[in-house]
Image (cartoon, rainbow, N blue to C red):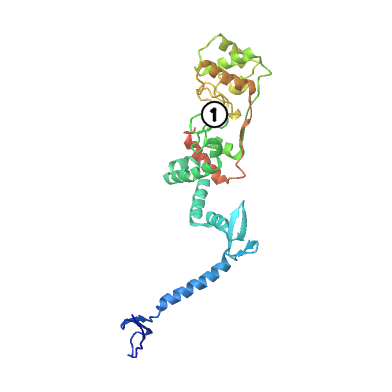
């Protein structure tokens, strides 16, 4: 191999660097295409612009914040802040194409009565999609992602039992203003035998246990001045929706976990515990009227109504 310096003097010929190996192996000096060079220069200019426009470089104990901003609406007020991934997301959720289309549907729902919404396939599809998202964000922590609830704490929304009413308007009122389930404790009012008798009567109402002398005594306490249970649950034990009192004649148990009890004694103990201790500060649902818009609450009312085949 030899390192020989050659020159090319033919006009129009490709220029070389002047190096050659083995006599004829030369190193050409081809210039880069102009489009490639301009593209490279453009990326350099873009990088410099990006460094100033967006958060980029560490600077002491902080970093360069950039001069690009994002504007979004939250709580009915407009906010403008330096660009970052959070503000960009909020801006997209507020003014992105999907957000605008969602607001159009929400406005349509706000102006349409419940019966018409239920008959419109497109609006029902939107309710199922947007309502599921709202439910998972705001309600699933208590009622579960599917609305099954937790016995003793949070009502099941997928059955047909509605403590406060299952109409669209009743569900909307529940969502807007919240609910506070309450039952006084009878442990200091009734003695152990009386509580057992009332528990037997309550279980006999739904056929969990047969009628007996204890349940007959319990009925007198239930419907009399001693217990006064009828004032909330009604003379027939079917509950009063305006008070959120449970229907005791069906086999749907929201506080006492009777279905999970294995023996009649365990079932009796579950009901007896509720009668003795009452229900206080464990069935409180917050009001969503200030967190969700009127249209979102209406949408949620339709969604929840569908979960349990509302009334």
Q: Which residue is mark 1?
A: 151
Q: Is residue 23 above or below residue 123?
A: below
Residue at the (61%, 20%) spot, across then down: 275
User: Residue drawn at (54%, 35%), measured in percent from left and top?
Assistant: 143
State the residue in front, 35 or 135: 35
Image height check: is 162 above or below 16?
A: above
Q: Quadrant of residue 49?
A: bottom right
Q: Residue 15's image quarter?
A: bottom left
The answer to whether residue 290 is left or right of residue 126 is right
Whether 155 is drawn above or below 185: the answer is below
Q: Quadrant of residue 16?
A: bottom left
Counting from the top left corner in percent of width and height, residue 177 is at: 61, 38
Q: x, y percentage for residue 283?
A: 60, 31
Image spot of residue 138 (x, y percent): 56, 42
Q: Is residue 204 visible?
A: no
Toward the front, the furthest residue is: 1
Viewer can see residue 80? yes
Q: Position of residue 179 (x, y in %)?
A: 61, 34
Q: Is residue 273 left or right of residue 21?
A: right
- Front-most of residues 295 and 140: 140
Please report the residue visible at 50 percent of the width from the left and 72 percent of the height from the top.
44
């Amino acid at each position: 191999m030899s390192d020989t310096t050659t020159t090319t003097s033919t006009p129009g010929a490709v220029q070389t660097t002047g190096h050659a190996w083995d006599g004829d192996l030369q190193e050409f000096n081809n210039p880069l295409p102009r489009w490639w060079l301009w593209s490279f220069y453009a990326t350099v200019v873009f990088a410099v612009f990006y460094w100033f426009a967006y958060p980029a470089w560490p600077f002491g104990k902080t970093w360069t914040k950039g001069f690009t901003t994002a504007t979004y609406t939250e709580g009915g007020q407009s906010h403008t802040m330096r660009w970052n991934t959070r503000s960009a997301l909020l801006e997209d959720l507020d003014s992105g194409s999907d957000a605008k289309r969602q607001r159009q549907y929400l406005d349509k729902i706000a102006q349409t009565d419940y019966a018409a919404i239920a008959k419109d396939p497109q609006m029902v599809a939107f309710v199922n999609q947007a309502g599921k998202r709202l439910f998972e964000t705001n309600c699933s922590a208590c009622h579960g992602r599917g609305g099954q609830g937790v016995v003793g704490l949070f009502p099941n929304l997928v059955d047909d039992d509605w403590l406060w009413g299952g109409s669209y308007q009743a569900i909307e009122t529940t969502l807007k203003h919240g609910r506070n389930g309450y039952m006084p404790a009878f442990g200091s009012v009734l003695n152990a035998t009386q509580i057992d008798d009332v528990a037997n009567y309550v279980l006999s109402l739904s056929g969990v246990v047969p009628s007996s002398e204890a349940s007959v005594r319990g009925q007198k306490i239930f419907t009399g001045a001693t217990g006064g249970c009828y004032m909330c649950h009604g003379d027939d034990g079917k509950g009063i929706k305006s008070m959120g009192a449970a229907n005791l004649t069906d086999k749907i148990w929201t506080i006492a976990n009777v279905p999970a009890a294995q023996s009649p004694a365990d079932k009796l103990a579950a009901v007896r515990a509720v009668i003795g201790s009452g229900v206080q500060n464990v069935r409180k649902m917050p009001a969503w009227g200030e967190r969700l818009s009127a249209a979102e609450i209406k949408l949620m009312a339709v969604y929840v109504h569908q979960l349990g085949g509302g009334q």
